Image: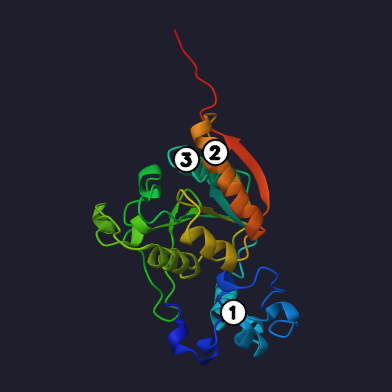
């Protein structure tokens, strides 16, 4: 498990960016805590001491563990029920058929879809953990490496994982551990299928894991697009590039 702030001295003076002044120069800038715009900010003392420029040791560990992953792609919607997980699985296997080395993480802890969408070879569960590195070996089906809470939660081997009753921050931590605690090996693409919304999981992954880009999924109905636009706003704010928008279930065919 990743170490907590309570166990490492550099976190004693943490910077709460949500409480920063409107004209904040940024906690990692040279003028942090010293600029005139920093007056009255609750982070002023911590920023002046260099807390915003300190290297988080957890980030170094994460970078080392994911060093073999060339591109990390988000698949998200903001809205549930638009076929996002199906698109993520199809995209993963399409990339694999073109010769790519592909991994797929199902980041929806409350409603994991991957166990229902992909049939694992017999004997794949329970997943094995390396005794030295403590990393989990991902499941694999038809050349794509797979990880989901549905593969590691209690009862996963029997296919009956109970509901994950946990708050947002714990969900974010769980997803982070599945991402950086898995031995992905060398990958050309690691796809992350995000849950609906714009909450803890989205923020944790976007701010911590150096994402390459995002693919958005919607349906033609306004009920879907209004939430997808919120996802667009979030990605812009977090600086995550958007490569494409998939309009799912856009056509209705009647066969006679």
Residue highlighted by disc 3: 86
Element under disc 2: helix
Residue highlighted by disc 1: 60
| Residue 4 in the figure: left or right of residue 167 | right
Distance between mark 3 and mark 2 Cα atoms:
21 Å
In the image, is residue 122 above or below residue 186? above
Q: Where is the C terminus found, in terms of image quarters?
A: top left
The one nearer the camera, 114 or 250, is: 250
| Dot 2 crowding, Cα within 10 Å, few <14, some 14–19, many 20+ | few
The one nearer the camera, 83 or 228, is: 228
Relative image position of residue 172 (x, y in whole percent): 44, 64
Q: Is residue 71 at least partly visible in the picture?
A: no
Quarter assignment of residue 220:
top right
Relative image position of residue 227 (x, y in whole percent): 52, 42
Residue highlighted by disc 2: 226
| Residue 40 in the figure: left or right of residue 117 | right
Q: Residue at coordinates 55% horizontally, 76% vertically from top-left? A: 16
| Dot 3 crowding, Cα within 10 Å, few <14, some 14–19, many 20+ | some
Counting residues from the start of the chain, the first of labels 3 and 2 encountered is 3
The residue at the far front in this view is: 40
């Amino acid at each position: 498990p990743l170490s907590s702030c309570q166990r490492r001295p550099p976190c004693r003076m943490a910077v709460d960016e949500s409480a920063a002044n409107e004209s904040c120069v940024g906690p990692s800038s040279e003028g942090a805590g010293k600029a005139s715009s920093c007056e009255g900010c609750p982070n002023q003392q911590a920023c002046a001491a260099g807390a915003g420029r300190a290297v988080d040791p957890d980030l170094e560990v994460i970078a080392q563990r994911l060093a073999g992953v060339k591109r990390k792609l988000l698949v998200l919607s903001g809205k549930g029920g638009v076929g996002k997980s199906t698109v993520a699985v199809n995209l993963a296997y399409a990339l694999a058929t073109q010769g790519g080395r592909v991994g797929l993480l199902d980041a929806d802890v409350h409603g994991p879809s991957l166990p229902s969408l992909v049939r694992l070879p017999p004997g794949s569960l329970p997943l094995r953990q390396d005794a030295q590195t403590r990393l989990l070996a991902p499941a694999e089906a038809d050349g794509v490496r797979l990880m989901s809470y549905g593969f590691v939660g209690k009862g996963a081997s029997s296919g009956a994982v109970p509901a994950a009753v946990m708050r947002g921050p714990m969900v974010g931590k769980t997803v982070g551990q599945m991402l950086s605690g898995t031995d992905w090996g060398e990958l050309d693409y690691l796809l992350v299928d995000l849950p609906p919304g714009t909450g803890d999981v989205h923020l944790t992954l976007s701010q911590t894991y150096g994402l390459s880009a995002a693919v958005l999924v919607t349906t033609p109905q306004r009920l879907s697009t209004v939430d997808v636009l919120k996802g667009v706003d979030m990605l812009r704010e977090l600086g995550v590039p958007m490569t494409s928008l998939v309009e799912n279930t856009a056509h209705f065919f009647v066969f006679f």
